Image (cartoon, rainbow, N blue to C red):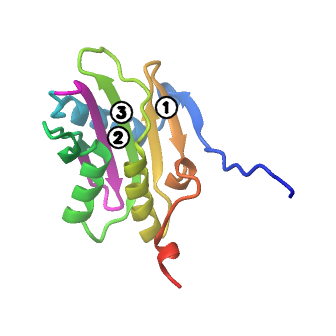
Amino acid sequence: MIKREITKNSKLTVYSINDADLQVVQLLEEAQTAAQRAYCPYSNFQVGAALRLSNGQIVQGNNQENAAYPSGLCAERVAFFAAKSLHPEEEIEMVAIVAKPKTAKSFKLATPCGSCRQVMSEYENQQTKPIRLFLLNEKNEVYESESIDNILPFKFSDKHLKE
């Protein structure tokens, strides 16, 4: 038997927020605002997401916790579901995600969980163009991906459901 390694690297670009364009900075600020309004009495971990739609609208989401832990919802899914509920015809152009412990002064790099990656991938598959992703770390560095596909290698999609 011949073995070979299969990899699909995440393609991320990292740069200072000072080098980010104005739309990205604005979207990260919207995500920070959303995070500060998160309902997180159990984890005390604030997560915010902000989406820019093709019509220029920005939709925010934040984590919503519940004493019955599985009943809560992540910021990314709150934002994506709200965007498609309120603006079903608009494409999602980009998403910014930030996170921090409630008592921390700065945001830290936190990547979307597997469920959120799957949901974001589903919406990206429905569109004509990829969704750009921006994450922020505590050093004010922006991590950018040109597509959700880059953070979900070997994804499951509607193509797997068809014969």
Estimate how packed mark 3 is, as few (under 14), some (14 to 19) or many (20 or more) residues with alpha carbons within 10 Å.
many
Q: Residue at x 57, y 50 (%)?
A: 150
The amino acid beneath tag 1 is Val
Q: Residue at x 30, y 55 (%)?
A: 80
Indicate which disc, 3 or 1, sits on the residue closer to the N terminus: 3
- Callout 1 secondary element: strand
Calculate the distance from the C-alpha at mark 3 to the C-alpha at mark 1: 10 Å
User: Is residue 50 something that shows in the picture?
Assistant: yes
First to last magenta residue range: 42-60
Label ID, residue 142: 1
Residue beneath disc 3:
98
Q: Is residue 162 left or right of residue 38?
A: right
| Picture coordinates of residue 161, whole percent (x, y) | 47, 77
Which residue is more in the foreground, 20 or 2?
2
Q: Residue at x 47, y 18 (%)?
A: 139
- Callout 3 secondary element: strand
Residue beneath disc 2:
27
The amino acid beneath tag 3 is Val
For the stretch drawn in magenta, the main secondary structure is strand
Q: Is residue 96 left or right of residue 77?
A: right
Which residue is more in the foreground, 21 or 146?
146
